[in-house]
Amino acid sequence: MPTLEFLRSEIERMRVQVGRQRKEILQLQRAGIPTRSAEELLQRMLGKIDGLCAERAQMKAQLPKPRGRVLGGRKW
């Protein structure tokens, strides 16, 4: 099972890839080249990111909540 840090880094890496894919789609559209397959790939990538985000949220919910003091709080 992947760690929380791995999921975070994977989500960030995929978001960078999505940005690149969007730029590539724009370039193809400007050149008049059909972009249907590239847009389908983009949708699959976005779906995978959504799945990873859901998995990350589930893992975060399982972590124990810290019971420390608030930073900068009053000291009585």
Image: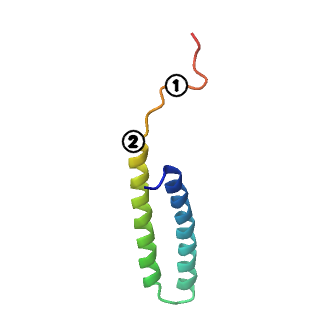
Q: How is the image coloured?
A: rainbow
Vertical placement of 9 versus 59: above or below? below
Q: How many marks?
A: 2
Q: Are marks 1 and 2 in contact (CB under 8 Å)?
A: no
Vertical placement of 26 versus 74: above or below? below
Check disc 1 and report the residue beneath it.
68
Instruction: Give SS at disc 1.
Output: loop
x 53%, y 23%: residue: 69
Q: CA distance from mark 1 to mark 2?
A: 18 Å
Between 43 and 2, the one lying in front of the other is 2
x 43%, y 35%: residue: 64
In the figure, residue 31 lies in which quadrant? bottom right
Q: Is residue 62 left or right of residue 10?
A: left
Q: Outermost residue, front direction?
A: 1
Q: Position of residue 47 (x, y in %)?
A: 40, 66
Say few, some or many: other residues with alpha carbon within 10 Å of mark 1 (under 14 / 14 to 19 / 20 or more).
Answer: few
Check disc 2 and report the residue beneath it.
62
At label 1, which amino acid type do we have?
Gly
Assign the N terminus to one quadrant of the image.
bottom left
